[in-house]
Every structure is written in structure tokens, then in C-alpha cells.
Amino acid sequence: MNKNKLSTIFLIYLLFTLSSCGNKPEPINYGHDECEFCRMQITDSRYGSELVTEKGKVYKFDSVECMAEFAMIKNLAGDSNQSLLVTDFFRPETFIDATSAFYVLNSNFRSPMGLNVSAFDGSVSGQKFVVENGGQILNWADVIELVKQKSM
């Protein structure tokens, strides 16, 4: 093999390797993907979530409580090098940062694992939801505490 061909092959390999190591979320294939924590099929797009590690490994979950419990067990819940993402209740195709999302606890909106917490991209949409449907506004720390209480 000549030197140029070998260099080209190496460059293509290097580009492919580097491009596959991103730490971006992947779309959840609802009805097919399985929750990393509880092993249930992920079906409700309003409650999907993902944890993306610093190295780009993506873990998919059927609810925020599964992701939170997984993150606590693996000591990743407070690690800023990991991306904790939840789907916006009003725009399920949109991932938002779990640590800055607004949450609403409302037993009339059943989440897959029964914590009944829905995520919202901003306080306005979360407050609007509470005005229209009732419930209690939470932040990420509150969700973690609820998950801890549930798992005791």
C-alpha cells in the first residue's frame, strides 16, 4: 500500500472514531427501547429520560425516577460531567437538563413507575400546568428526595 492510501485510511478511521465518542443524547425508540434501571419497555414519551456519560455512553429510562435512582446508585447524580436529561411534558421530543427543569408532582398524571412527576422546560409552563391541573412544583433536589423516600 502506498503512503497516501495508508494515511487516508488512517484519517477516515480517526474521524469515525472521534465522531462516535460524543456525549449527545440519542432519540428514544418508544415501544422498543428498554429502561436501563427497571428493564420495562419505554412507552410514554412524556416521561422518557437519559443519562449521557462524559465518554458518550447513553442510558435510557422510562421515567425520571428510574434515571435518578440509577444515577444515585452509580454515584452520578451530582456529577456535572454527566448529562441528566428529561423530556419536556408538553414537547416530548425535546430533551431538557434534568437539574434545571421544573417538575410537577400530580397523582392525576401517572408516570410509568408511579412517582407521578412530570418535567417542564421552564417555570412558566410548570406553573401553567399547576394552575390548570393542580399539583406541587418541585426542583431536581426535591425529585431526588422523593426517589430516596420511595426506595426506602
Image (cartoon, grey):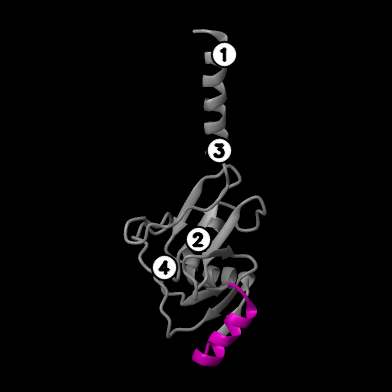
Residue where numbered disc 2 is placed: 67
Tell me if mark 2 has few (under 14), some (14-19) or many (20+) residues whose alpha carbon lies within 10 angstroms of its own. Answer: many
Instruction: Check disc 2 and report its element: helix, strand or loop.
Output: helix
- Determine the CA span between mark 2 and mark 1: 47 Å
Please give the residue where the numbered disc 1 appears in the rendered image.
Answer: 4
Residue with the mark numbered 4: 45
| Vertical order, 61 against 10 (above or below) | below
The residue carrying mark 3 is 19
Q: Which residues are magenta?
A: 121-135
Q: Earlier in the sequence, mark 1 or mark 3?
A: 1
- Contact, mark 4 vs mark 1 (Cβ under 8 Å): no
126 in magenta: yes
Image spot of residue 116 (x, y percent): 46, 77
Q: Amino acid at mark 4?
A: Ser
Residue at (52, 71) in percent of width and height: 88
Q: Are marks 4 and 2 in contact (CB under 8 Å)?
A: no
Which residue does the image show at 45% across and 64% down from the upper left? Answer: 48
What whole-number distance in Å separates the C-alpha atoms at marks 3 and 2?
Answer: 26 Å
Q: Left or right of 23: which side holds 112? A: left
Label 3: state its secondary structure. Answer: helix
For residue 12, which numbered disc appears in the image? none
Task: Nearest to the eye among marks 1 and 3: give it.
Answer: 1
